[in-house]
Structure formats: C-alpha cells, structure tokens
Image: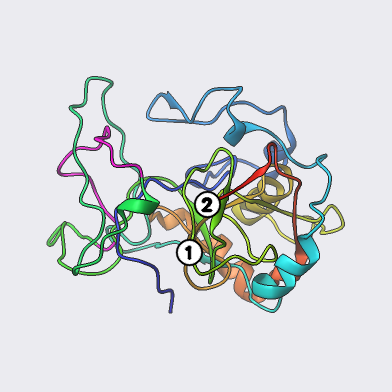
Amino acid sequence: MRRTRPTLLLATLCLALAAPSSAPAAEAEAADSVHAVGGCALFGADSPWNRRIDSRPVWKRSSAIVAGQAAGAELHLDLGTTEDYYGIPINVVDEDQPLLPLQLGVDGEDYGAESDRGPVFVPADAAAEGGSAADPDPDEGDRHVLALRFTLPTARHAYTWPARHCGPSSNTSADLPTYGMRFRLKASFTARRYSGVERRIVVAMKRYGLVYADQGSAMYVTGTADPRWSDALDQLRAMPLDGRALEVVEPFRRIVRC
C-alpha cells in the first residue's frame, strides 16, 4: 500500500497528459504542444516542466540512485477508475480565484519547511485526494491536490531546480534522489509492447520523464480518477514495468544542497 505524508501539496509529474484519451496511440508521436485542461495550458511552452529530456545526458550518479530505490519495484499507476476522488483530482479554477492559505500538514505534523506557504489559487472546496462526494474533506490520510506525481521512499536533503524544497535533514548521501530530479525511461525500452493509453504514458515517460516529487512507496504514480485508465492498468499488470528501466538525466541546473 502506498504511504505518503498527509499534506496538501501542489505536485507535478512531467507527463504530456493530465488525463487519458481515447485517441489512437500514434498521436503520442505527433508534434509536441502544451497540454491544456479546462482551456488552461499546463505551464508555458518554455517552462522546464514542458521541456523534452530524451536527448539530455545521463546523470553521473544515475546507476546508484536507480539501484538504491527504483530497481526491483514495478511502476504502479495509482489511478482510480471508479472512486470519486481516488488519487489526486484535477481542479480547474478561474483566474480571479481568491488566494487560500494552506494548512501544511495534518495529525499534528508540520511540513511547512518543505512547502510553499502560499496563499495559492486553490478553492476551499477543491476536490482533494482521499475525499469523496459524501465526505470531501476527511480528517486523515493523504491530502494532495492537483496534477500527477512520482514517489520513491527516501529523498536527499537537497533539491534540483525548478523544485526548491529539501528532503529530511539527515539524508545527505549524493546517491539519494532530490526533489525535482528528472527520471526517464531508457531509449532502449520499447513502447511497441503497449497500446492505447498505456503506450501514450510510456512515450511520455521517455520524452518528458518523471519528476520526483514526494517520499512514498517506490514507483507510485498518482493522478486523477478516471474510468479511461482501466486499459492502462490492465496492461501494466500483464506487462510490468520495472524501475530498472529508468535512468536519471543531468539536471538543467546544479543540485542545491540545503
């Protein structure tokens, strides 16, 4: 079972999609464009989150980082197909949305040092992870809002731009991943074995990669609930994707030690 810290975060996974599509898989290899949700572009065209990384060099510590936490763990699409708010729901708000202060942690925990304090453009009634139509704001459990993210068990006390928050202060090894570190599927990993939505996800992970955003069970990718994820979930169960297929790319800027 995935276990992550129960806090309200704006976390990002740099896939070229925010929800599945019924379009043919071949479209995943068409010309790139900035994806939009509810008419809003997901960051600007020049944003680091929208940069392709399939041609970037491999990071010098890639092998050690992957071997330490990702290798041997199967990629798990933690995506609901029937539940109301399973995973991390997508919320679309108007540009005049009032700013909301955040409570950074629940159950007595405080993750303020690892989070932007805001206030942020999040409505008070936003659909949050773990909620439902009957109980939209439960008292316990993960409380993430917006987007998709990728987890590994342990983070280094450092960060990689454009992230700007640190992992636990006791984790100083350079062979640990930093928040914001970009992983990608190796070029040798073929997408042809998959089809439909799953193939689109695989192609995206080769071109744009996965951004390490939080501590939790290894290789968990969380996103909004949608019944169209069903085919992708079935394919991954039949043809698992092991973390050994990943590599870490060279950061756009230097790694910042905290």
Which of the 4 quarters of the picture holds residue 207? Answer: top right
Q: CA distance from mark 1 to mark 2?
A: 8 Å
Give residue 71's quadrant in the image. Answer: bottom right
Q: Is residue 117 left or right of residue 194?
A: left
Q: Secondary structure at mark 2?
A: loop
Q: Nearer the viewer, residue 182 or 171?
A: 171
Q: Position of residue 200 (x, y in %)?
A: 65, 48
x and y percentages locating residue 129 in the rendered image: 30, 58
Label 2 packing within 10 angstroms: few (<14), some (14-19), many (20+): some
Mark identifier at residue 258: 2
**Residue drawn at the location 53% of the way across and 59% of the way down:** 157
Q: Is residue 243 magenta?
A: no
Identify which amino acid the numbered label 1 is placed on.
Answer: Ser
Q: Is residue 6 visible?
A: yes
The residue at the far right in this view is 188
Disc 1 marks which residue? 169
Work out which quarter of the rendered image holds the N terminus and state it.
bottom left
Q: Amino acid at mark 2?
A: Cys
Q: Is residue 214 above or below residue 154?
A: above
- Using the image, determine if residue 61 lies above or below residue 140: above
The reply to whether dot 1 and dot 2 touch (C-beta < 8 Å) is yes
Position of 200 relative to 74 (above/below): above
**What is the magenta range?**
116-130
